[in-house]
Image (cartoon, rainbow, N blue to C red):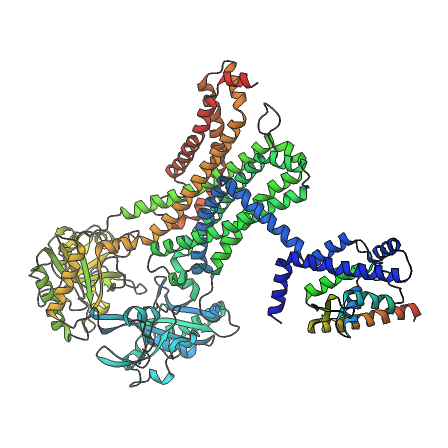
Amino acid sequence: MSVPPLLRQFRLLFGGRRAERELDAEMREHLELLETQYREQGLDPREARRRARMEFGSQEPLRADAREARGLVRTRELTRDLLFGVRVLVRRPGFPAVALLTLGVGVGGAAAIYGATEGILLSPLPYAEPDRLVAAWQLDHASGERQEVSPANFLDWRERATAFEALTAVEPYGFDWLSPEDGPIALETGLVYEGFFDVFRAPPLFGRTFLPEENQPGRGNVAILGYGLWRSRFGGDPDIVGRVVTFDGEPYTIVGVMREDFAVPSNEVVWAPKVLQGWEERSRTSNFYAVFGRLAPGVGLGQAAADLDGVAAALAVAYPTANASIGAALIPLHDQIVGGIRSALWLLLGAVILVLVVVVASVASLQLARAVGRTPEFTLRTALGAGPGRIARHLAVENLLLGAAGAVVSFLAARVMLDGIRALAPADLPRIAEIRADGDVLGFAAAVSLLAVLATGLAPVLLAANPGLQRALGPGGRGQTASPLLRRALAALVVVQVSLTFVLLVGSGLLLRSFVAVVSQPTGFRSDGVAAVTVHTWSYLDGGPARAGFARDVVERLSGMPGITAAGVASGIPLMEAIGADFAPLTLPGAPLRADQNPPLVRFTVVSPGLLDTLGIPLRSGRPFDSRDRADSLPVTLVNERFVDRYLPDREPVGRRISLGGSLATNGEPLNPEIVGVVGDVRNVALHEAPAPAVYLVHPQVPTGANAFIARGVGSADVVLSQVRRAIAEVHASIPIHGETTMEALVAASVRERRFVLVLLGGFAALALSLASAGIFGLMAFVTAGRAKEYGIRRALGAERAELLTLVLRRGLALAGAGILIGVATAVPAAGLVEGLLFEVAPLDLRVFGLAGLTLAAAGAAAVLVPALRAARASPVEVLRVE
Amino acid sequence: MTPAPDRLHGHLDLLILSSLAGGPMHGWAIAQRLRVLSASVFEVGQGSIYPALRRLEAAGWIRARVAVSEAGRRARFYSLTKPGRRRLEAERADWADFAAAVQRVLDGA
């Protein structure tokens, strides 16, 4: 019986006329039968008809009853109210247009930010029981730094810790692969331990995850693709499972593709089983594993951390040389992933709330002003017999319509703005792929729009239902002005808007000054026309001499290319942490360490002689690297100014020897190079991080890791980039390209997150500013229009135009001033909250506060200018004539 | 508005449904049956069965078909639908419970 009820409803609703006819016929027939019966009993026709009528009952209420029974009345009235509402809104489109614009931009923007922050910050990770997932790190008690985990430590942790259902690790690696499109490249790879995917309870999109035995030697030639990599490099081929692909010159069978939201460490990687090498089982000094775990059921984070700490302490006792100062740190996985962007997103979420309040205040003043403007209409309709309930219902329907339209408009706006946010967001913003305009965003936009309109629509409904209030708020009889109560209500709304706008302006101002401060930091290197390409050489070139020869050949070929002015090779690139950030323990002869002291770690970069010139790193004293510095000559080094300040403040650095251990030591003997010169500081880590002490070593003397070719040309950096690629391919056709960038792109990328937050907050501030200005304008226009006669009379009594102008201006500026004062009181504590995002700007920066105040005052003056001029133009003659 | 005395109010639906349990009837016949069987205890305006019939029809418990009556007139004949039959059983049970409960109270047990 699924169709008939529908059909029946339809017939009852739309076959109304016929149903009435049928009912009439049926009742008439019944009456006739009754009449006949009485006549047959011997009554005269008139009496028979009377009795029949009595017995049947009155027909009209019965008809109404039957109609009601069919549910027709309510539907018809609702349709009428809806049509009436649409007509009212469309006939005077100014109000709905402004309201919808306000809702669309304000609520839409807020919903977009909400969507982005919700996706990143609030929604749980897309794994089963994500609260039990943690990341585990080594904690160096000496430096307080978190670091990756060494293989042997991980194996011991896994064996001894009891608080975990499972611990697993992934080793960052790069598979060389011959891309059909781009030639030889290196794919970001994760070599994973047994149970890696099970810890996350992550099912594959296609195929399967790894089997336990695939971590055994000889079984590990299987691979799983990340979703992003599968789409970008393997054409999203759904039949990929079972295909054999050559990685690192060996055949690997693709056994699965993970889902889009599995991103450990990202979804642009390929995973393969980690097959443990013998030496790794004992390696505690080189640490490069990312370790993840799932807490055992019922075990809390603190309990698990204590458990792992205990294991680490035991290891510190057992292996004092490597582990003396090594503890363990557990971090909830969500915290680790969201990490640095968290505070910025909370800031934006706070800004969302401020903007929403400003938007609601705008809609509220629009509604109030409109309701008062409609007082005559309500009066007339009441006079014509419409009850207060009826008018209130009309208004409610109007507001519902407006709220629904607002919900649609703001959701559409939110979708557009979310696309904008995604485009603007740094590519490495965590969980960016999970952001989309989904049900949550729709719900947010719809709920806020409806609530804003309905809540603010209460005022007109109350007005309509309460004639007393109408008299109190509405413009009275002749010559009177708008009522003080209404003016005060509107003024309060404007003051709220101004004060919150001030807070937003201060916030954006502080971020803007920080941004300017960051981008105007000297990077310490030239980036115009400079490009860098990194390669993997180790599996193609055997031994130091072959690699050194390759590097020399590429640099030579590059230097001979047209337009290239300088070229070199280095073990690392500034601002690109992923590539070869290497540190070595430093000791200074003549300054022996105390027994309990660890030697400081100093950053070292291995460069070819021409590299410092390529990057434009200036020589401050001494000499640069040159052809004198051969593999068999005395080892030399260049140090930066910060190094000198820190370690050799009172002595002439050139000519001194330093001692570098760690990976630079050969057979336990540290490298002891002589300082031949001092060079300028470079910001290696980030623009906002002050340069650290650093040393440069020259390539022929230290054969390791020359894998970044850097060149500077007269043309654009993109041209230079393609030249570097060509030079590499010409020297060795199958060397895989690992990464490529221009230095300008690198600099831009390093401030992209800051720019992202700044643009969003600035957009909010601009939106709030325009709404607040519109609020001031609206209120003053309303007030001055109501007082036109008063101004005319004043003019007639001798007031100058300038006096009237200042009268109105002063009133408008008083509003702005009150808002600014409240804004200052709010912004002072609020600014402290953003301190962590600031750079070289104090939270209570006077210039920012002052400028925010000036901006608002100027906007207020501009908004009030038109009403003020109108007041000043009031003509005394006209007023007298009207009166 | 309903001319029914309070005693009938709310039970008219049940009475109509039970009248139709024996087979299709038109409005006149239903009214006569109620009058006769209740020995005129239910003195209601006979017209009030028509809104009730419309209500039951809208609820899907009865359906109407136009046919020719014994008297040779075209009339709307009402019959129970399957849900109507279920409804009747439910209402009947309710009524029996209710009546029994009232009876027990009156008997002063």
Q: Position of residue A831 (x, y in %)?
A: 43, 44
- Quarter that holds the C terminus of chain A: top right
From where the camera sits, is residue A288 visible? no
| Image quarter of residue B83 | bottom right
**Which is more toward the observer, A202 or A510?**
A202
Q: Position of residue A466 (x, y in %)?
A: 67, 38
Q: Name the residue at the top extreme.
A: A798
Q: Position of residue A328 (x, y in %)?
A: 40, 69
| Image quarter of residue B89 | bottom right
**Which is more toward the observer, A155 or A310?**
A155
- Determine whether, in the image, residue A776 is placed left or right of residue A214: right
**Which is more toward the observer, A73 or A541?**
A73
Q: Position of residue A562 (x, y in %)?
A: 8, 57
- Quarter that holds the N terminus of chain A: bottom right
**Which is more toward the observer, A524 or A745?**
A745
When the figure is inspected, residue A866 is found, relative to residue B27, above or below; the finding is above
When the figure is inspected, residue A449 is found, relative to residue A535, above or below; the finding is above
Q: Residue at x 45, y 18 (%)?
A: A801
- Determine whether, in the image, residue A243 is placed left or right of residue B75: left
From where the camera sits, is residue A818 visible? yes
| Image quarter of residue A44 | bottom right
The count of marks equals 0
- Determine whether, in the image, residue A397 is placed left or right of residue A232: right
